[in-house]
Every structure is written in structure tokens, then in C-alpha cells.
Image (spheres, rainbow, N blue to C red):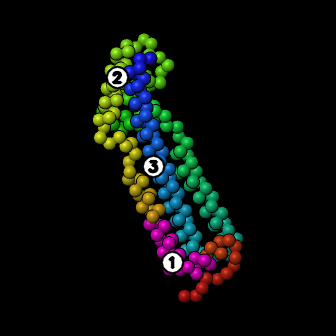
């Protein structure tokens, strides 16, 4: 393979690998924020149910088991599953081309030609021109971020707000939160009177 072709291909693949790392980090953070928000919501809900109705121990344990099962499902849904999706150079190129149609499928063609064992049957000058044009168009995109930040901001904001609510509850009602925690662990004690 022509050294100019392989160098241009490596340059494109390095850029795509950097985008993949950034995307995986954002997907992880999004999953972490969503799972955290759901976990904090469940804790608040369990506290409110226990405080309002003081259910007996079997009911508390059933609620706790359902909450733990839902938390495990949430972690799998928002953390494990998204990170197991394969994202190679071709998938990243396709994602970029969906977001930026002006790439006109040149980026994915460049990646696929670069991954081919040889470019027999293709004019080396034509392949090099395609690679250079794809690399140039790729570098001209002002914002190569393929991840919209709005879901990350919303999930992070929700998790932060719920975290503040929980922290406020712990600071303002430490005795009630302590009793609730003990009740969730199986002790039959009453909440303090206000």
C-alpha cells in the first residue's frame, strides 16, 4: 500500500478513535447520571412511603427488594448495555456522516478503503485523492462532536437536584433518615415525634 495512503488512513483513524473515547466517556456519564437519579428517586420514594404509612417488615423488605431489582436493571440498561456496543472506525464514520451529510459518504469510504488488505484494482492516485478529500472535509467540520449535550445536561441536572434533596433531608432530618435506614435493614423502631 502506498505510504501516503496508509498515513492519511492512520490520521483519520486516530481522529475517529479520539471521538470514540469521548463518546464512550459521555455515554458512561449519561448512564451514571440516569442510574443515580433513579436510585436517589427510589430512596426518596421509599423514605416517603415508610414515613407516611410505616408498613410492616415484610412489606418494607418487598419494597426494598423491588427497588434493588429495579436498580440492577437500571444499571444494566444505562451503564452496561451502552458500553458494550461496538464502535470501530467504520461505525464512528457512519455516525459522523449521519450528523454531517456534507461528508457525502467519503469518510466511511476512506475508512473502509484504509481497512482493506490492499487496494488492488483501484488507482492509487484516486484512492489518495479520496482519502485526502475525506480528511480535509473531516477536519473542516467545526464541531465534530457527534453527541448532543442536552441529554447529558438534563440527566446531570436531575441527579444533582435529587442529590441536593437527599443531602437536605439528611441534614434537616437526621434522626428520621437514621430511623428509616434502620427500618430498611429490618429493625422495628418508630420515627421520632416532631
Report which quarter residue 12 is drawn in.
top left
Identified at 52% across, 60% down, the residue is: 36
Q: Secondary structure at mark 3?
A: helix
* Alpha carbon distance from label 1 to label 3: 32 Å
Relative to 164, 107 lies left or right: left
Q: Are marks 1 and 3 in contact (CB under 8 Å)?
A: no
Identified at 48% across, 75% down, the residue is: 168
Tell me which numbered mark, 1 or 3, is placed earlier along the sequence.
3
According to the picture, the residue beneath numbered tag 1 turns out to be 171
**Viewer-proximal residue, 109 or 55?**
109
According to the picture, the residue beneath numbered tag 3 turns out to be 26
The image's mark for residue 130 is: 2
Q: Main secondary structure of the magenta part?
A: helix
Q: Position of residue 18 (x, y in %)?
A: 43, 39
Tell me which numbered mark, 2 or 3, is placed earlier along the sequence.
3
Report which quarter residue 188 is drawn in.
bottom right
**What span is in magenta?**
161-179
* Alpha carbon distance from label 2 to label 3: 31 Å
Q: Position of residue 29 (x, y in %)?
A: 48, 53
Q: Secondary structure at mark 1?
A: helix
Residue 167 seen in the figure: yes
Q: Secondary structure at mark 2?
A: helix
Amino acid at each position: 500500500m502506498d505510504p501516503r495512503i496508509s498515513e492519511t488512513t492512520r490520521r483519520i483513524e486516530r481522529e475517529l478513535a479520539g471521538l470514540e473515547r469521548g463518546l464512550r466517556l459521555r455515554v458512561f456519564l449519561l448512564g451514571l447520571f440516569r442510574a443515580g437519579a433513579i436510585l436517589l428517586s427510589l430512596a426518596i420514594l421509599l423514605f416517603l412511603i415508610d414515613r407516611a404509612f410505616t408498613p410492616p417488615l415484610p412489606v418494607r423488605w418487598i419494597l426494598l427488594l423491588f427497588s434493588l431489582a429495579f436498580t440492577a436493571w437500571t444499571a444494566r440498561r444505562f451503564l452496561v448495555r451502552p458500553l458494550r456496543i461496538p464502535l470501530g472506525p467504520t461505525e464512528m464514520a457512519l455516525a459522523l456522516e449521519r450528523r454531517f451529510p456534507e461528508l457525502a459518504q467519503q469518510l466511511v469510504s476512506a475508512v473502509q478503503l484504509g481497512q482493506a488488505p490492499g487496494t488492488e484494482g483501484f488507482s492509487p492516485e484516486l484512492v489518495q485523492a479520496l482519502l485526502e478529500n475525506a480528511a480535509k472535509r473531516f477536519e473542516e467540520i467545526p464541531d465534530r462532536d457527534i453527541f448532543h449535550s442536552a441529554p447529558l445536561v438534563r440527566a446531570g441536572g436531575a441527579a444533582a437536584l435529587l442529590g441536593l434533596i437527599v443531602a437536605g433531608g439528611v441534614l434537616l432530618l437526621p434522626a428520621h433518615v437514621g430511623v428509616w435506614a434502620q427500618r430498611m435493614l429490618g429493625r422495628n423502631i418508630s420515627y421520632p415525634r416532631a
